[in-house]
Image (cartoon, rainbow, N blue to C red):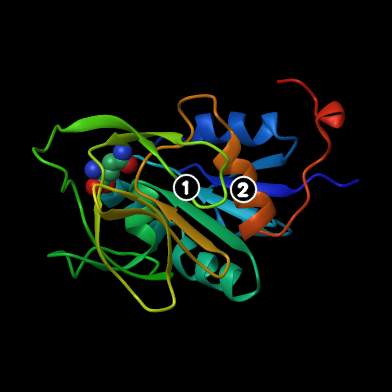
Amino acid sequence: MTAPRVGVLALQGAFREHRRALERLGANVREVRLPAHLEGLDAVVIPGGESTTMAKLMRAYDLEAALRTFVERGGAVWGTCAGAILIARTIQGRPDQPRLGLLDLTIARNAYGRQVASFEADVDVVGLDAPFRGVFIRAPRILEVGDDVDVLARHDGDPVAVASGRVLATVFHAELTGDDRLHAAFLTRIAGVALPPPNERTPS
Ligand code: GLN
């Protein structure tokens, strides 16, 4: 069978860890730095990092329109942490920050306690058999979700994993603990692609 073809936006941030998680699942992974790199992909992951830096680079390399078109044509996108900020329609207090606006969300940057506040928490995610260890690193907080957005997980009442159609956003990092269940769920349930059976995956 053909392996899912997945891109990882590799402008800045934690893209290598996503790449490794996706490769462990048997995906064919490509680092995306230019619009042409989206060609033929089933899905793209936008990693955590620094959303302002990523947004500037995304604009400089013409990736904003290209990623929107990618989704309009049926491609799936998952944004983690800074990636979730880039996916949101509204960034509180920052109307000028470039963003993709792929999900009807209002999100606030660095909104969990003090600027440096980071923590881990077990999160119950819809569809996963057991809690997922979320790593929240200067995480954004989702303040509002639109009617067409499903909340897949909450932490202390706040949505921390949300999806609509082929777009998923998590405010926590899911690539740092070696637990690949969320990557698998993104590919199979959001992107709608099949994973190679475990014995056909090349060990990385
Ligand atoms: N604080 C970062 C931002 O606002 C996001 C943090 C992260 O991705 N871990 O861009």
- Tell me where residue 193 sits by quadrant: bottom right
Q: Which residue is pictured at 81% across the width and 44% down the height?
A: 3
According to the image, label 1 marks what residue?
A: 125
Residue 185, position as x, y percentages in the image: 62, 48
Q: Quadrant of residue 108?
A: bottom left
User: Residue furthest toward the left?
Assistant: 114
**Assess mark 2: CB under 8 A from ligand 1?**
no
Coordinates of residue 84 in the picture (x, y in percent): 37, 54
Identify the residue at image location x=70%, y=34%.
25
Residue 98 vertical placement versus 50 (above, below)? below
Q: Earlier in the sequence, mark 1 or mark 2?
A: 1
Give the residue type that dot 1 points to: Val
Q: Are marks 1 and 2 in contact (CB under 8 Å)?
A: yes
Drawn side of residue 15 relative to residue 203, left or right: left
Q: Can you name the residue that lies furthest to the top here?
A: 203
Q: Residues within 10 Å of mark 2 (few under 14, many from 20)?
A: some
Q: On the rendered structure, is 62 left or right of 56?
A: right
Q: Which secondary structure, mark 1?
A: loop
Q: Residue at x 10, y 41 (%)?
A: 113
Residue 132, percent from left and from top: 46, 36
Compare residues 160 and 126 and report the one nearer the observer.
Answer: 126
- Residue 17 falls left or right of residue 27: left
Circle 2 SS class: helix
Mark 2, residue position:
185
Q: How many tags in the picture?
A: 2
| Residue located at (38% from left, 79% from top) | 147
Displayed quadrant of residue 40: bottom right
Is residue 64 in view?
A: yes
